[in-house]
Amino acid sequence: MPSLTPLISVVVPIYNTSAFLRQCLDSLVHQTYPHLEIICIDDGSTDHSLDIALSYDKDPRVRVLSQTNRGCSSCRNRGLQMASGEYIMFIDSDDWLDLDAIRLMVEHAEAERADAVMGTYVREYEGRSLPKRIFEADFLSYDAEETRRYVHRRLFGLVGEELAHPETVDALNSNCITLYHRDLIKHLSFGGPYGTFIDLYFQIQALEHCQRFIYIDYPVYHYRKTNADSETSSYNKELINSRLQFFRILMRYIETHQLGEEYNRALYNRIALSMIGIGLNELAAPKSFIDQAESLKQVLRNEEYKRAYSQMDMQYFDMKWRTFFQLCKHEKTVPLVLMLRGVDYLRKRV
């Protein structure tokens, strides 16, 4: 091991995850890379999470703080302010890291003088693990221009052959699969009017000025999906409005940062692809079949969606997705709801 090993700060927001927290913290204190500071911020948990976290502070690398409930973004911001490491990572307290994750990411960061190193992740269901590959490569090393074109732009949406895999549209969003150099993110913060896209907006800001980006096809992160049913089966009546609000924020971002036409094309493709999530959310609404179809028709009549489908190149989709998006384009929402029911049935049988 080199004589000077950089300190890595790991920020762990904690809220009512007592059933999973030991697995998370064990995965940190037993990392094969030892030079860590582990910053645990308990966000006013009402279960035993704080007691569990405090049981780890015998390890001098672990710091535990408690605050009144202010949300995950507040915890991450506080942890970011406290972090003194050369590199910074975030981990959610119901997930866990591969034991070799930090060592591998730090080695690549140091060898390539990288601002950001991204790994892959595994979706952990009850009794089944599903790895998620992000890029079609085992290893990538991108300079500033390549990072902008192939990583930063992709955060806005997919273009060209990337559309063959519409399920990957949000694959880069998570902050938990990325090791950041402190200089890249110390001036940033989490939060804002971004709904469920707070992570994505942070990633967009972070990677816009990344001079060297590394990707390794190694599952550094384990994302627990055992509670996913409770999230996805509950209807969010604000979803459509929050999506549209966020897309308009990204449109302004592209314009003010003069990011160019490929970014606009990517964003409109993201808007078109968002009908998958919006449609699945609508299935959970306490409405009749016909009312669900009418709600989707109203969404598709928004100017943003009309433009998205008018410019979308559908040649890269397989038959099922081409059919799905053609139904969206032509506002055929009765067969669209039927097709969404099929998608919903299949995804629940992972």
Image (cartoon, rainbow, N blue to C red):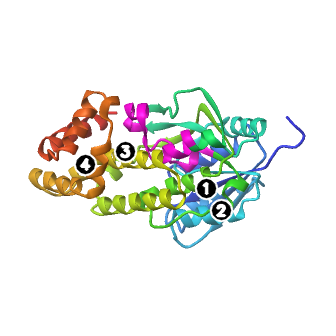
Of the image marks 2 and 4, the number of the one nearer the N terminus: 2
Q: Decide if residue 127 is in sight here.
A: no
Of the image marks 1 and 3, the number of the one nearer the N terminus: 1
Among the 4 quarters of the image, the one containing residue 318: top left
* Circle 2 SS class: helix
- Pick the quarter of the image with the N terminus: top right
Provide the residue designation for mark 1.
12
Instruction: Kindly identify the amino acid type of the residue bearing the numbered disc 2.
Output: Gly
Q: CA distance from mark 3 to mark 4?
A: 16 Å
Provide the residue designation for mark 3.
269
Q: CA distance from mark 1 to mark 3?
A: 33 Å
Q: Which residues are magenta?
A: 149-178
Q: Position of residue 237 (x, y in %)?
A: 27, 62
- Main SS of the magenta part reads helix
Instruction: Kindly identify the amino acid type of the residue bearing the numbered disc 3.
Output: Asn
Q: Kindly identify which numbered label has been placed on residue 79.
A: 2
Q: Decide if residue 191 is in sight here.
A: yes
Of the image marks 1 and 2, the number of the one nearer the N terminus: 1
Q: CA distance from mark 3 to mark 2?
A: 35 Å
